[in-house]
Amino acid sequence: MKLAVLLSVKQSTLMTKSFVFCLLLCFLLVPTNSKNANETDRLALLEFKNRITDDPLNFLNSWNESAHFCNWPGVVCSRRHQRITSLNLQHQKLTGFLSPYIGNLTFLYQLILDNNSFMGIIPQELGNLRRLRFLWLRNNSFDGEIPANLSACSCKELRHTCTAEIKDSIPTSRIILTLRENS
Ligand SMILES: *[C@@H]1O[C@H](CO)[C@@H](O)[C@H](O)[C@H]1NC(C)=O
Ligand SMILES: *[C@@H]1O[C@H](CO)[C@@H](O)[C@H](O)[C@H]1NC(C)=O
Ligand SMILES: *[C@@H]1O[C@H](CO)[C@@H](O)[C@H](O)[C@H]1NC(C)=O
Ligand SMILES: *[C@@H]1O[C@H](CO)[C@@H](O)[C@H](O)[C@H]1NC(C)=O
Ligand SMILES: *[C@@H]1O[C@H](CO)[C@@H](O)[C@H](O)[C@H]1NC(C)=O
Ligand SMILES: *[C@@H]1O[C@H](CO)[C@@H](O)[C@H](O)[C@H]1NC(C)=O
């Protein structure tokens, strides 16, 4: 009897332990990550919008809570993760600065801002975007240099083209980079 009780106590602590362990595991495995990540993308877009000082075509008005950010104009998301893969805002007459939050869009594959009036620096944070392949910033008014980190430009095959393009385009106007053509 005593043994049985002891056993069941042992068993139940074991069960509690494995229950707690399981809970912990579940907590770790449930995609809290992706939830945070898509929130990071949404926040990055809002910060991007915050740094726009003039939007005469009201293009960014529809970047509001009435629709999921994946459906905001100019935005394309990956279907599976609902992470932003493309941001294409060319020809929208936008004036402003490029927010460093752009560097949090870790799934970004292309960033196309041709033919706007972006000014100020090109944020270093773009160097965080390992998936970025197309960075088209033609006909804007950026100052300063391409972030060192980008111009080191895992360009592989295209290294020469890429370097040439960078030299031509500093400090402004014709920045068009195709990154990591090979990887
Ligand atoms: C983020 O992802 C989570 C889990 O996949 C989902 O429940 C939530 O609605 C998403 N939020 C946004 C803003 O996309
Ligand atoms: C919010 O976006 C919708 C389109 O998604 C647009 O029709 C509406 O006017 C926007 N609201 C504001 C306050 O700009
Ligand atoms: C995103 O980027 C900004 C500026 O680069 C940073 O301050 C912020 O903490 C980053 N992380 C998230 C989760 O928004
Ligand atoms: C640059 O953009 C302006 C409008 O912002 C446009 O009038 C001009 O034609 C563009 N130039 C080039 C070389 O694309
Ligand atoms: C910018 O716009 C002008 C006129 O709208 C067009 O001729 C030019 O090709 C555009 N430039 C780029 C880099 O898209
Ligand atoms: C660029 O620098 C940042 C830190 O400033 C780093 O996290 C990132 O990995 C670098 N990117 C490349 C392509 O080296």
Image (cartoon, grey):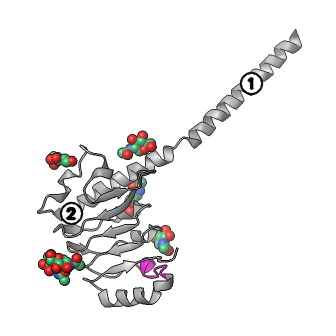
Residue at 17 percent of width and 59 percent of height? 59
Residue 139, visible in the rendered structure: no
46 sits left or right of 39 in the view: left
The type of residue carrying mark 2 is Ile
Q: Taking the image as four quarters, which one is ligand 3 found in?
A: bottom left
The type of residue carrying mark 1 is Thr
Which of the 4 image quarters holds residue 11? top right
Q: Nearer the viewer, residue 30 or 88?
A: 88
Q: Is mark 1 within 8 Å of ligand 1?
A: no
Residue at 67 percent of width and 29 percent of height? 19
Q: CA distance from mark 1 to mark 2?
A: 58 Å
Q: Is residue 153 above or below residue 84?
A: below
Q: Is residue 115 above or below residue 108?
A: below
Q: Secondary structure at mark 1?
A: helix
Decide whether residue 93 is among the magenta residues: no
Q: Secondary structure at mark 2?
A: strand
Residue at 75 percent of width and 27 percent of height? 14
What is the x, y in percent for residue 60?
20, 57
Mark 2: give few (<14), some (14-19) or many (20+) Cα within 10 Å: some
- Give the residue at mark 2: 52
Residue interval drawn in magenta: 148-155
Residue at 27 percent of width and 83 percent of height? 174
- Most extreme residue toward the top is 1
